[in-house]
Image (cartoon, helix red, strand yellow):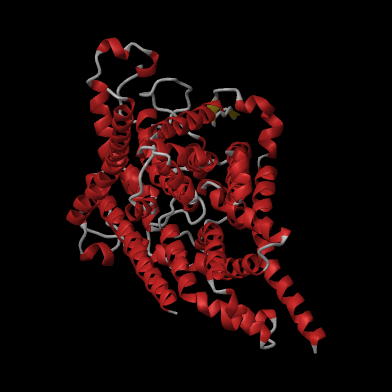
Amino acid sequence: MTPTGRRKLLSSLFVGFCAGAVLLALIPLALILFFVVSQGVMSLNLAFFRHMPTPVGEAGGGMANSIVGTLILSGLAAAMAVPIGVVSGIYMSEYAGSRFAAAVRFAADTLNGVPSIVIGLFAYVVAVLPFKQFSAFAGGFALGLMMIPIIARTTEELLLLVPGTMREGALALGATRARAVFSVVLPAALPGIVTGIVLALARIAGETAPLLFTAFNNRFFSTSLRQPITSLTVQVYTYATGPYEDWHRQAWAGALVLVSIVLICSLLARLATRRLERMHARS
Amino acid sequence: MPRSKSRSDVAFRIGTGAFGFVLIALVCGIGVILAIESLPSIQKFGLSFWRTEIWDPVSGEFGALPFIWGTLYSSVLALLCPAALRQPLVFITELLAAIPSIVYGLWGIFVLVPAVRAVETSLPASLRALPLFSGPPLGLGMLSAALILAIMVIPFVSSISREVLKSVPPAQREGAYALGATRFEAIRAAVFYARTGIIGAVMLGFGRARGETMAVTMVIGNNPKVSLSLFAPQYTMAAVVANEFAEAADRLYLSALVEIGLVLFIITLIINSFSRLLIWSMARTEKVVAEPVEAEAAA
């Protein structure tokens, strides 16, 4: 075979190898989605959303308390993380060149990489140990910690996308820096930032490890912030590791709800960004 | 007038900077608080904590070797799988990266573990004699944990690698084609160009795998024994904290678990700094090559 022929053969082999790697990576992922949907649909019904868990052995029942718990915990997390995340994002983009901004950026990346279980440990020491009480508040605090760096980095990136001429225009009209940011730059990037917040919410709604010993678990319906509270993820964990068939069915249904939340949020975010991009392209 | 304006600007800078400082304070706070809480265990066991295999809450003796071993072993195994370069199927991989780990764990327990058990039992006896495959074929164990980690890390590593490869200047690839390179040779050149960034991506993936808790806890079998066997139930650092923390009643037990968390945190710091450095240094070479004179000199 000529050298050129050999090189061409090697090239096609390599491209085939890449395609094979893609397939190999996608097969398990497709399998996971397939099982979650097929198993989940079988056990998902209206009662799942409206009823409380039943005692072991009794058929039926649902996860109404866990769904409410997940909503409360995510709300608490957002209340803590959105202001801190957005404002520190503003700082990073406004003073992008400064040393301190680089330090904040590094802190955000590190916080983002801290294993969720370690975040849970920290929240336990700070928010559970002093009060000798697992609480929804502690769980929300742990989730908020995970949310801050995501929101901060998204805000920073989106603010940097806003054309510099808009900011310069505002400053040239005599606006102070704060006014330029809050009246001109931030509104321009707002849809994107909201999208980022929705994605961050979707991600923390799926977290389990930081909740295990902060929000803990609760078999009853609770909306008190000072009491332990259950969540979809912790409930799925309890059911999946338990020995009963009924529990396993409920766990699959819970997993389907979790995956749907994530998929719907991602799709919405994608649609929103696409509209944004089109707007930018037009202007 | 200009004076009041500049004062407002200073106030704005300090005000927003204070929020930025919260992030730095949080990272430092996590390190300090974990260190304080793990003091009793550090004082009592010292370095032997990381060398011994004993984990006995009842008699109050703790050694973390099994967890370190399990963590490293499972993370490395997971990374061996996605070694091949992946082409982007961007949207799908990004969605899959967002699936909660508890869902992976659920799938692991009910689908993957039985499948692995079937493979293990069907292995011929001659192979089972090897230390790599010794132990009862439970399905729960290192092999299942490594597989589930690999599945979870793939979308992560491939999406970062894709971004790094996208940052390779088109001129690089066009040049390769212009010289008559085949597709493979052009890709090889691009990968070589982006190598530091890809190594950074792999390290971040390793970080993911090391800190992953729930899915691993559910399939690794949770047994504090050091073993080379892929079939043996083992433990990881994150898994032991998740499993035992809520039950840790006395101070020393708690402290030992927090010390494990502290080490996970320190490893995070190291891996993060190192991979950021790699990606930064890559960004710098990019700028250098963009200048024609430098590029000529390099050629």
Residue B262 visible, this angle: no
Q: In this view, does B132 lie to the left or right of A50?
A: right
Q: Which residue is drawn at 52% across and 54% down?
A: A214
The extreme left residue here reads A42
- Number of numbered discs overlaid on the protein picture: 0
Residue B224 visible, this angle: yes
The relative height of residue B87 versus residue A186 in the rendered view (above or below) is: above
- Position of residue A81 measured from the top left corner of the image (x, y, whole percent): 55, 65
Quadrant, the N terminus of chain B: bottom right
The relative height of residue A25 versus residue A162 in the rendered view (above or below) is: above
The relative height of residue B222 versus residue B107 in the rendered view (above or below) is: above
Quadrant, the C terminus of chain B: top right
- Position of residue A276 measured from the top left corner of the image (x, y, whole percent): 41, 73
Q: In which quarter of the image is residue B60?
A: top right
- Position of residue A100 measured from the top left corner of the image (x, y, whole percent): 72, 60
- Position of residue A158 measured from the top left corner of the image (x, y, whole percent): 52, 68
Q: Which residue is drawn at 58% across and 51% down?
A: B290
Q: Residue at x 40, y 36 (%)?
A: B185
Q: Is residue B167 left or right of residue A62?
A: right
